[in-house]
Amino acid sequence: MTLTMTACGPVIHAFSPVYGTSPGMGAGAVVLGDPSQALERSVMMSDERRAYLAQRWTHWQEYEQTTKADRNGLHTRQAGFE
């Protein structure tokens, strides 16, 4: 995925046609929010693939928010690996 850094934080610009989802992406999906505009800008991807990625993105956001959120509903942002 290609991100653009803004004053308000990262924004998804587009997805690679081979982008895949996994359980480890939940926290990032929560931080990045709605991927619909980025999926529209993504090239070499069928409408079915866009719909599938949008559905899985939502699934992992919900999973992260319901099973991994602390008792105050706060999520820690991660800058990357050191």
Image (cartoon, grey):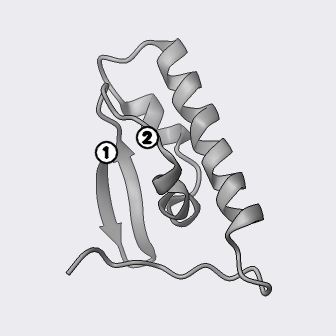
Q: Position of residue 63 (x, y in %)?
A: 69, 54
Q: Nearer the viewer, mark 1 or mark 2?
A: 1
Position of 46 with respect to 64 (left or right) is: left
Tell me the residue at 34%/40% (across/down).
Answer: 14
Q: Which residue is labeled 1 in the image? A: 1
Q: Which residue is labeled 2 in the image? A: 38
Choose between 36 and 56: the one closer to the eye. Answer: 56
Amino acid type at image mark 2: Ala
Crowd rating for badge 2 (residues with CA inside 10 Å; few <14, some 14–19, many 20+)? some
Up/down of 43 relative to 3, above or below: above
Tell me the residue at 46%/33% (across/down).
Answer: 39
The answer to which image quadrant residue 26 occupies is bottom right
Secondary structure of the residue carrying numbered label 2: helix
Amino acid type at image mark 1: Met
Q: Position of residue 62 (x, y in %)?
A: 72, 53
**Where is the N terminus found, in terms of image quarters?**
top left
How many numbered circles are shown? 2
Q: Disc 1 vs disc 2: Cβ atoms closer than 8 Å?
A: yes
Q: Position of residue 77 (x, y in %)?
A: 47, 79
Q: Position of residue 54 (x, y in %)?
A: 58, 34
The answer to which image quadrant residue 41 occupies is top left
Up/down of 74 relative to 40, above or below: below
Tell me the residue at 52%/50% (across/down).
Answer: 23
